[in-house]
Amino acid sequence: MKRVEWVCEGFDDRDFIGAWLVAEGWRSLRPARGSPPTRVGGRDVKDGTFAYQRGTELQVVVTPAQTVDQVSAVARAFVRGATPENPLDALVLVVDDDAMVGGIGRVVAAMLGGLREHAGVNSPSLFGWAWSDPAPTSEQLPSQQTLERVIVSAMLEAYPDRGPAVAAFLAAEPRGPEPTGKSYLWSLFAKWFPDSRGDGALGALWRDPALRAVLLARMQALGARGWLTAVVA
């Protein structure tokens, strides 16, 4: 069974990535309440980490590092922990990053470069990208390149009439802070996905057929399946 470790910034990233894997046909390995944790790669999958499996050939563990500064540290620990008994076939990094160069963020490129410098005989294949979306900035779509921007842009493509409503709502209280990607995303959720909350809230996006089609295209454009093609080949 091949193993891939996926390190992201936060819990929203983890939930979105996990929901995408399920939408692509992966099976969640999250145990039932009260059951012992799943073991992957010789360790328990717990403390906010989720695991998924594809057939009998590949397992993916998604770990939220909680801050962008911790992504490198968590990734280094996985690389150093790889052994012949518990090999790591691939490591995937994804972060928010405004400084884009050739389709990859500067932060991600620096992280991957640092990991390659310390590569050993058991080192995995390395992949990474930054959340980004090419749609032009507007009063309905914030400029900062984040996961939230990717989702909001997809929502506006699937349902163009929703953008003006949220923009008007956010502009109605001018004394508040400047709206961020999270402001737009969770305002859309409050109106159109009010019953989605807690772990897995972002999974509701993938259960909407129109939105799911757009999000799948977005992930394809980001190169999110490149690691899978390389690992399975």
Image (tube, rainbow, N blue to C red):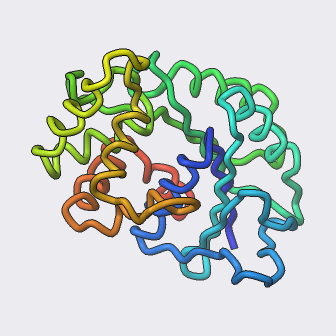
Judge whether residue 101 can be spotted in this image: no
Image coordinates for residue 177, horizontal then vertical, percent: 43, 18
Image coordinates for residue 25, horizontal then vertical, percent: 43, 74
Q: Is residue 156 left or right of residue 63?
A: left
Looking at the rendering, which quadrant does residue 37 occupy?
A: bottom right
Number of callouts in the render? Answer: 0
Q: Is residue 165 left or right of residue 179?
A: left
| Above or below: residue 66 compared with residue 229 | above
Judge whether residue 158 can be spotted in this image: yes
Nearer to us in this view, 160 or 5: 160
Q: Is residue 105 left or right of residue 57?
A: left
Q: Residue at x 83, y 80 (%)?
A: 36
| Above or below: residue 230 compared with residue 147 | below
Looking at the rendering, which quadrant does residue 114 occupy?
A: top right
Q: Residue at x 27, y 66 (%)?
A: 208
Q: Residue at x 69, y 83 (%)?
A: 32
Q: Residue at x 37, y 41 (%)?
A: 185
Which image quarter holds the N terminus?
Answer: bottom right
| Above or below: residue 48 compared with residue 7 | below
